[in-house]
Image (cartoon, coloured by chain):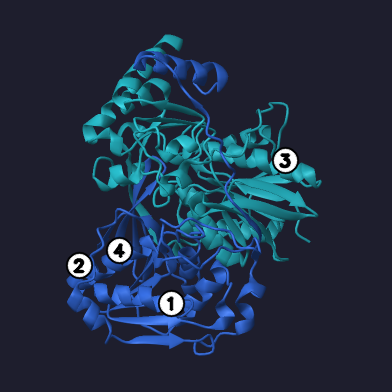
Chain colours: A cyan, B blue
Amino acid sequence: MAKGVMIIAEQRKGDIRKISYELVSEARRLADSYGQEVTAVLLGSNVKDKAAKLGNYGADKVIVADDPRLETYTTDAYTSVIAEIAKANGPDILLLGASARGKDLAGRLSARLGAGLAQDCTSFTVEDGNLIAVRPIYAGKAYAKVTFNESRPQMATARPNVMAMNEPDESRSASIEDAAFTLDDGMIKTKVIDAVKDEGGKIDLTEADKIISGGRGMKGPEGYGILEEVADLMGATVGASRSAVDAGWRPQSDQVGQTGKVVSPNLYIACGISGAIQHLAGMSTSKVIVAINKDPEAPIFQKADYGVVDDLFNIVPAMKEEIKKIQ
Amino acid sequence: MNIIVCLKQVPDTETQIKIAQDRKSIVEDDIKWIMNPYDEYGVEEALKLKEGFGGEVTIIGVGPKRVTEAIRTALAMGADKGVLINDPALEGSDALGIAKALAAAIKQTDFDLIFTGQRGVDDDNGIVGSALAEFLGIPQISVVLKVEVSEDGKVVKATRPVEGQSLVIEAELPALLTAQKGLNEPRYASLPGIMKAKKKPLDEKTLADLGLDPAEFGEGARRLKITELTPPPQREAGKIIEGETPEQKAAELVRLLHEEAKVI
């Protein structure tokens, strides 16, 4: 009989990533709703001292797999170790982050465990012991409510920035266990030979709390200078529409939309973006949307909480001065 | 070097998605079906590697007869042959079912490298590539932006963006790569290419041809079931900020974001 909610924590260079705390918080809510326990699984090298913090966010138990070969993520090593831990513990629900790495891992793990997998979910509930997940499809043009057949675990990845994070509670602690696993070098078939940090070390769009995006109205790559300035000031990440990326003004990694990144920041400011359906699909789960566009008929205004009908090259610099005043 | 590209057909990204009466599927009547955009980058990369190393590019699709259009497009771009896995029992299969069917077809061929798109722009799963690599027991490198194969054709090196970083990952062939936008600029099929494509081999295979049991596929075997489709939560058009000058509008906007929405 499968039981409990298990989450796979993510670390990079020994630092636990925010998505892990979002997962533990969500797992806690789900587990409490049907009287289950939360187990977090942490893989890495010399990471055991980081495990306690997962307890502060709501994990009852943390299983740590510590091995130098787990320092850096590889699909093969992580799949193998987590599959072994999952089989030994038999969780009812298994949650991962819908990060680049979480999605890579979840696909392979679901095939190894023969488990159903709901990717990139935006909400979860448990009804009669069954997980019900909601996931945007067609990049958010429709939402699918999904359930699982009798196979266990019920696997899902959670979209970063969507699940509410608990306040860490220092008085709450988890029992910490060493994982039993075997890892043979021969099974690790990929090797990370280089890791290059993105320029400026900016926060990725999928994890950003605030995004300021520019579209065709930016008129060229130079136009983005003012967006960068405002972004730096308020701790935002700069994004772009497909037309701006296709014109070569911004790199592909900046694209928001159906063939780019699907984002859900607290604040999304769209500058000179008309709001093509593919773009709207990629940002409509943002909490607050601002549109700045000269054209009052632009479809983006239909989605925006706040709209400014004016030239962005007048508005954005003036915004910068106003933001300075409140800081 | 023999390369396989797996592709699916998806609704054009311009499509307005309408939910069908059963509230579990979409209205397919007016849909223009296209090759999944991410798969197209896989086709292009395979053709580029073939130009350097020789060998054959085989396109494999799963789905109803209409999927042959997408396969013919890839053949017109320059791929050598196509296979369509078409069986009524496959209808409604989940990602693991599709991956299992693809794995069975691929096991019958000799291959060095497999490309899939990093995800389908329809169901946005991104599972089939990883699951296929698992069923074939080969390494995967997901969401790649750059691919290099060593001169001896034995090792692939691929660049993969993750949050805030680009990783360069190496694997011995055979391996599976999932293609991301930015990997290349897919070529258009030329008119002679389109003419030639009509004569290229395109086999159809059923589950029985692949030695698979139909009972393991289709709607009934789904581990994940859609119980309801809904339109995205509606957002109401909000306030249009009034003001005489850009400065006034900007001041009002920042005030509202700070005091009302509390996001800055």
Which residue position holds label 3? A29
Depth-wise, is mark 2 or mark 1 nearer the camera? Answer: 1
Q: CA distance from mark 4 to mark 1?
A: 33 Å
Residue type pointed to by label 1: Arg
N-terminal label among 2 and 1: 1
Image quarter of residue B189: bottom left
Q: Secondary structure at mark 4?
A: strand
Residue type pointed to by label 3: Arg
Depth-wise, is mark 3 or mark 2 nearer the camera? Answer: 3
Label 2: few (<14), some or many (≥20) within 10 Å?
few
Which residue position holds label 1? B66
Residue B200 sits above or below residue A211 on the image: below
Quarter of the picture holding the C terminus of chain A: top left
Which residue position holds label 2? B151
Q: Residue at x 21, y 77 (%)?
A: B193
N-terminal label among 2 and 4: 2
Query: Could you tell me if residue A60 is visible in this image?
Result: no
Q: CA distance from mark 3 to mark 2?
A: 53 Å
Image quarter of residue B49: bottom left
Which residue position holds label 4? B156
Q: Secondary structure at mark 1?
A: loop
Q: Secondary structure at mark 2?
A: loop
Q: Residue at x 80, y 47 (%)?
A: A34
Label 1: few (<14), some or many (≥20) within 10 Å?
few
Where is residue A112? Give x, y as percent. 57, 66
